[in-house]
Amino acid sequence: MPNRAAILNLPLDAYKKYESLVEAGFVRAAKFLHRLHIFRVFDLRYQSQVVPLAAILADLGDACEHETNHAKLVRWYWNGVFGELYGSTVESRIGRDFLEVPPWIRGGELPTTIQESTFRPDRLKTMRMRLSAAYKGVNALLMSVGAIDWRSGQKFDHTIFFGEAVDIHHIFPKEWCLKQDLKPEVFDSIINKTPLAYRTNRIIGGAAPSAYLAKMEAGGAESPAIDQAVLDSHLRSHLIEPDLLRADAFELFMQDRQTRLLRLIEDATGQKIRRDTESGVGVGADAETDDETMESELTMEPAE
């Protein structure tokens, strides 16, 4: 497999020969990622996966725009993310994917990355850090499948994402969870988080879900009332069962949403996740919890 030294030893003539093709590949890669609702470099845990992505797209050319080919490439990408396969031995995997993915898209054998990708159901419980590839993957997937903002009812396209300062926020707020003596290693997981606009998160505050939903339905001076059926539809777009939120049923909510998120990942990767592989909350846990302060620091207020 080609390594970094081989690339650095690339003759100038060879570089000039492929320069435009490589540049076009990275442009296509940016467009591909935007279609997956990955809008910022910050949201790319494995930036190294962009390298084979760009190379594959350069190799495929216009064929990558075909719906069937695009769907295959999306599947490969999410297997790399949720299998967390680009965290080590990156150079060999980059080379292998470039050699295996284009032939597979053209009708060949399944790439090694998809064959080796696995996801444990208990991993959702331990994904609490923004540094986790799968953590960021769930957030992007939710937006990709049609999650809409609870307050505005708008989908999270590129304009809304930046204009409304969309970020990952708690569903059962941290303040409420602490008052219920819930542990951060439980309520800080991605199961209890979802993409929301800055203004929507301000309405939520630290209140119980039943309270902030009632507040949104009642409306106020700055926000008009939202019909309950409409709000329920918004919640379901985030794979949230409204009745569990209105009942402040944290444990049932966590169980239900974990199941829904696992189905989401299965659909994205084309892999069946074995439900009998759960091994406890602590297994594979991220090193630290995702600090709410970090969320506020990384979230800009929306442009006026």
Image (cartoon, rainbow, N blue to C red):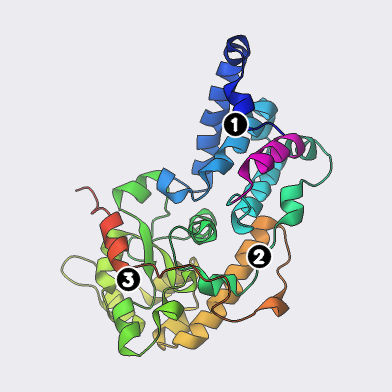
Q: Amino acid at mark 3?
A: Ile
Q: Nearer the viewer, residue 207 or 191?
A: 191
Where disc 3 sits, the SS reads loop
Residue 119: which numbered mark, if any?
2
Q: Earlier in the sequence, mark 3 or mark 2?
A: 2
Q: Earlier in the sequence, mark 2 or mark 1?
A: 1
Residue 33 coordinates in the image, percent (x, y): 52, 42
Q: CA distance from mark 2 to mark 1?
A: 30 Å
Residue 226: which numbered mark, if any?
3
Where disc 2 sits, the SS reads loop
- The residue carrying pointer 1 sits among few (fewer than 14), some (14 to 19) or many (20 or more) residues within 10 Å by Cα, namely few
Left or right position of 221 against 79: left
Quarter of the figure that contains the N terminus: top right
Q: Amino acid at mark 2?
A: Phe
Q: Vertical placement of 276 versus 105: above or below?
A: below
Mark 1 lies on residue: 4
